[in-house]
Each structure stands twice: as structure tokens, then as C-alpha cells.
Amino acid sequence: MIVLDFKGDADYLKHVYVESQKAGRQLIIFHLGYPKLSARYNAIDSFSRITEVATRITNQLPDEGEASAFKEFAWQFINVIAMVLVVMGETPDYLKIRRYITDIDALLILYGRHWLAENGPEDWQDELGELQDSINLKSLPRIDQGKDLEAVAMVRYLNTHVTFDQVLGGLISAFRHDREYFLKITVSIKPFLEKLTTGNIASILAPDKANVDDQRPVPEWAQAIRSSAVVYVGLDALTDPEVVSAVGTIPCL
């Protein structure tokens, strides 16, 4: 049973709790108004295909007229970010997507170091450092100007050591876009991500499972269904309707 309480009324929650206890059923509470007491839920950490991550995030963008092109490009960049995170053994979440969609240089450096540590020559760090030191800022192509020099050196170095890597290819393609053009494309999705990752709500929607001090549960839908649990969702719509509107677009919530 899923109980949707748009206002997040405390008395109603008490009533749900009492009835759940009477029925002997587990109660899972997800409440935007009480983040310290709420369960945590990452809507993009479980998927059959990695492309589902980008689809879930960009579904709320308009797809008519010129906006459809921005939606397609935003999907492409988010899909690249998600693939890189998974290959590096990290779980995609809204905080990471928000960070790297505006700082693709940092992600390129992380993945480049990850790839070279597993596949590169033994002295790759020395060679990469020498290459970075040899870069002349005045002779940089316009497309590389303003970008992280280590990222620029990483691309040049990897191009001489990698024959084919689908993930790396997509990441380099995103990196090579003009910075201003890249920001224009991603600006459509940034407000949505900020609504989901600002303040206390970030710890609910982008849970850090490695934080052993955070004892709030991170239930899975399959687990809740198997145990016939009652899932209470308090959206606290009267406090911040903009955030509630964004949370309401999250799949499976």
C-alpha cells in the first residue's frame, strides 16, 4: 500500500502508523517535511539498462519544438556521466549528476586516471605530468581554452594509448564541446537537479550509503512489495511547492 499525502499532515501520519501497527505491517516513511526521520530513496541507483538513468532525469523536460534538441543533448551528456560512474564502481545519484554535468573536466580526469591505473603503462603518471607541463597556454586551440589543463593533457595522452573505449569516447566527445555551448545545453536540466539536491533534501534523494553514521533506512521497492509494507509519502507541498513538483516527477515515487 502506498499512501500519498501531499500536505504531509502529522495527524494523518500518526493515523497511518497506528493502522499499520494494528495490521502487523511494516511502515516505511518518506517525508520531505521531516528529513531527519525520513527514509532515503535514490531513484536512479537501480536499473536494467544504464540508459534508464538519463531517461528518468530528462523525462520532465519539454520535448516539443526547439526544446526537444536540448532534451536530446542533455540526455546524451547525463548518459555519459552515468556510464562513467558505473564503470568506476560508483552509484549514480542526483548530487553526482548535478556536479559533473557542470564540471565534465573533473570527471574526465577521474575516469582517465581510473583507466590508466588499470590499463596504462607503469610510468603513465610521469608521462602525463610531463605532457601537461609542456602545454603552451598561448597556443591552445580555442576549444580547449578555459578548460582544466590536466584534462586537456589527459585527452592528448589517452588518444595515444587507447585504441577504442566506448565510455572514454563518449566522455571525450562531451569534453570537446565548446564550454559555452555545453552550458547552454545543460542549463535546462540544472534547475530540476538543484531542486532535488539543495539543503536537507539532498541527503534523502541522494543517500550516501557509505556513511555509517546515517542510520536512516534506504528501502528498495522490491523489498517493500515482498513484505507487503505500507509506504507513506509526505510531500509537504504547502512549504515548498517547487521542490514538491520536482520530486513528484521522480519515477516510482
Image (cartoon, helix red, strand yellow):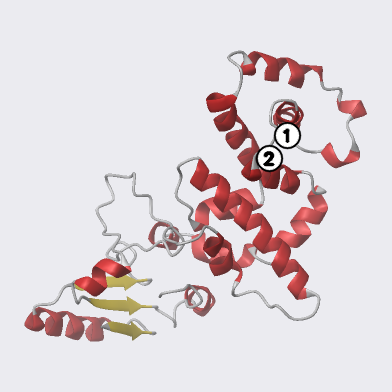
Q: Secondary structure at mark 1?
A: loop
Pointer 2 with pointer 1, Cβ within 8 A: yes
Q: Looking at the picture, tell me which residue is in the foreground, 231 or 176.
A: 176
CA distance for labels 2 and 1: 6 Å
- Tag 1: Cα neighbours inside 10 Å, few (<14), some, or many (≥20)? some
Quarter of the figure with the N terminus: bottom left
Quarter of the figure with the C terminus: bottom left
Looking at the picture, how far across and down is residue 183, in whole percent?
75, 56
Instruction: Please tell me the numbered disc located at residue 176.
Output: none
Q: Residue at x 13, y 77 (%)?
A: 25
Q: Residue at x 28, y 78 (%)?
A: 232
Residue indicated by mark 1: 148
User: Residue 22 vs residue 146: left or right?
Assistant: left
Q: Looking at the picture, tell me which residue is in the foreground, 163 or 84.
A: 163
Looking at the picture, how far across and down is residue 213, in whole percent?
27, 46
Q: Residue at x 53, y 64 (%)?
A: 52
- Vertical comparison of 171 with 55: above or below: above
- Tag 2: Cα neighbours inside 10 Å, few (<14), some, or many (≥20)? many
Q: Looking at the picture, tell me which residue is in the foreground, 244 or 82.
A: 82
Q: Tell me, yes or no, if residue 28 can be seen here.
A: no
Instruction: Please tell me the numbered disc located at residue 105.
Output: 2
Q: Amino acid at mark 2?
A: Asp
Q: Which mark is first along the chain, 1 or 2?
A: 2
